Structure formats: C-alpha cells, structure tokens
Image: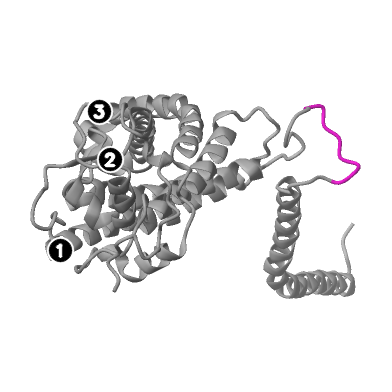
Amino acid sequence: MSLTPMEQKRLRYRRGLRWALALLAFVLIVPLVPYGLVTAESQLRNSSSDLWREARRPTQPENFRTQVQGIDSAVLINVRGDEWRHFRENTLVPYGGWLLLGTLGLITAFFLYRGRIRIEGGRSGKLVPRFATNQRVIHWFAAGLFVVLGITGLVLLYGRYVLIPLLGPEGFAITASACKEVHNLVGPIFPFALIAIIVMFGRGNGFLAIDFKWFLKAGGLFGGHAADSGYYNGGQKSWFWMTVLFGLAISVSGLALDFPIFGQTRELMALSHVVHSVVAMVFIAASLGHIYIGTLGMEGAVESMTSGYVDAKWAQEHHNLWYAEMEKAGMVDVEPNALEEVKRHDDVDFKGFGQPNVPTTEG
C-alpha cells in the first residue's frame, strides 16, 4: 500500500522528531553518567568502610554471636599487631639504636677525658673483705643471664640489619631462630635471679642524706676527692634500684609474652611488647655504664666481685665511712683466704656514720 505525499511527509517528520529527542536525551543524560558512577562508588566505599570499621572493633555489639570461643575470638580483625609492627620499625629500632650508640659515645668521651680512675698513691697491699662467695655467685649468675638475654634480644631486634650482610639470609634465619629459643628458655629464669639479688644485696641500699651529697659531687668521677660513702655509694644504690624496678618490668612483661595462655588479650600482649622492649633498651644502655665503671673505668673495683677483697686504699677513697667501720672492727689487712672466716661486713655497726669519730672527706 503506497503512502500519499502528505503521509510520507508526516512519517519523515515523526522520524526526525524521534531522532531529535534521542539526540537531546543523549546530550542531556550522558554528561550525568560520571556523576552517577562517582555517587555509586562513594556509596559502595562508605559501605565497605563501615564493614571494615565494624570488623576492626575491639568489642562487638551485644547481639553479636560467634561459635569460636576464646580470648578476642569475637574480634574479626585485630589491628594491635600491625600497630606494634609500626612502633617497632619506626620508633623502637631507630631510637633504640641511637640510645645504645650514644651511650657508647659518651663512655668513650668520658674515658678520653678522665682516663682510668686510679688509686691515689698506688695500692697499699692491705686487703679488706667486701663480698662473700654467695653474693658473688648470685651477682655473676644474674649478670650472665642478663648478658645472654641482652645479646639474643638485640640479635632479634637488629639482626636483619647487621647479620644478614655478614651471614646471608639463611645464616641469619638459623641464628635468629636459635636466639629466639634461648631467649624464651632463659627468660623465665631471670625473675629468680632478680629475687636472689634483692635478698643478697637489698640490705644497705636505702638512700641516706650522704648519698645526695655524693650525687652533688658526681661521686668524684670528674676529679677531686670522692664524696663520703658508706658500704654502697649513691651510684651503686641507684643501679640496685634500677635493676630491681627494670628487672620486675622486664620479667612481668616477658612472662606475659612467653606464656600467652593466662587470658592475655591482644592489647595486653602489645603493651607487654612495648614495655619489654623499651625498658630492655634503657636497661642495656645503663648496664654499659655500670660495666665500664666496674672494669676498665676504675682501678680495683672489679676485684670486689672476683676475689671478694678490695685494696684498703681503694676502700678508703671510694667508701671511706665503711672503711672506717671496718678498720675499727679489725677487718683491714686480712689474709686473702680468710674471707669466710672474718666477721661479715653486714654485721658491722654503721651507727657511727656522720659522727665526729668517723673520718670524712668533708671539713
């Protein structure tokens, strides 16, 4: 059936109108498509963020149920481990390294400035008993544990930076694994050594007024006469209490990490990591100063922990009040093998400290 010219004209008009409307719709709608996609993506992202935020919540809603029973089992994703990793890599490792290197630098500078602190006028040849055998055994037992734990801990912390270039990845892996086992096995023994230290050396380590005078003179470390001191001086007492407090912090946090079976949460484990590592770094740095003064830094000091005796001149220079009491008790110039036979130092009456009949370095 053929169309009349008028019908054909109307048909062409309708087709043109449809194409014009389609083109208009294309022009108006297509530019809005990116905005629609962005809105949908934003809604999806917000929904995803809400999902992951809920999954990371340390506590779940009351209506939350899980078939897995145990500590932190209701927490789907725990971020504490990642937070500890960031702290370890970005704070502990660099600042701990600077602390140790800085301490070694200060010790070296002090040695170059002061040299070894000698006994003025040389040794007298007279011996004074200072530490009994059981005290020295406990000291070296605790010191040995501390050194083993310190070295293995530093290997675990800095080994990948220092040992991998020397041993290679496989050699370091074996070394790190051995250090981890030794650290975990030896660590639980340290609290017992700490208790023995407290029992053996606690008496006489309370601070007195003369100790603050000792601090003001810096113990004579920078020259001049040492300040008055009893059996322990201010520095030794400070080291004792540092050992006790730091040792307790390291022991408690270490046991929490060694035995994660007593209900510790991830938050407590992460906190134990931070306390254990930070206190250990400060403890190791302080021990470097203690080791230096007790060996290379001061003549005659190490003998008190090796033979149990000290030279009378050393005792008179560094512990004059104690030496005066020992001299009064007849415990100066004893035989080298008489340590267990003479009267013990802690039986000496120290009531004479600061009295006029006790010689001091102050007018």
- Taking the image as shown, residue 320 lies to the left or right of residue 282, namely left
Q: Nearer the viewer, mark 1 or mark 2?
A: 2
Q: Position of residue 117 (x, y in %)?
A: 16, 57
Residue that label 1 marks: 114
Q: Secondary structure at mark 3?
A: loop
* Labelled pair 1, 2 in contact (Cβ < 8 Å): no
Q: Is residue 158 above or below residue 7?
A: above
Q: Position of residue 106 (x, y in %)?
A: 24, 61
Q: Position of residue 74 (x, y in %)?
A: 77, 37
- Taking the image as shown, residue 275 lies to the left or right of residue 16, namely left
Q: Position of residue 84 (x, y in %)?
A: 53, 48
Residue depicted at x 87% and y 73%:
10
The C terminus, quarter of image: bottom left
Q: Is residue 315 above or below residue 199?
A: below
Magenta span of residues: 61-68
Q: Is residue 50 above or below residue 188?
A: below
Q: Where on the picture, by quarter, is residue 9?
A: bottom right
Name which residue type carries label 1.
Arg
Q: Where on the picture, by quarter, is residue 267?
A: top right
Name which residue type carries label 3.
Ala
The answer to which of marks 2 and 3 sits earlier in the sequence is 2
Q: How dense is the environment of label 3, judged by Cα within 10 Å: few (below 14), some, or many (20 and up)?
A: few
Q: Secondary structure at mark 1?
A: helix
Image disc number at residue 338: 3
Q: Is residue 17 above or below residue 324?
A: below
**Spatial separation of the CA atoms under disc 1 and disc 2:** 32 Å
* Labelled pair 2, 3 in contact (Cβ < 8 Å): no
Name which residue type carries label 2.
Met
In the displayed image of the protein, which residue is found farthest to the left?
A: 121
Residue that label 2 marks: 331
Q: How dense is the environment of label 2, judged by Cα within 10 Å: few (below 14), some, or many (20 and up)?
A: many
Q: Secondary structure at mark 2?
A: loop
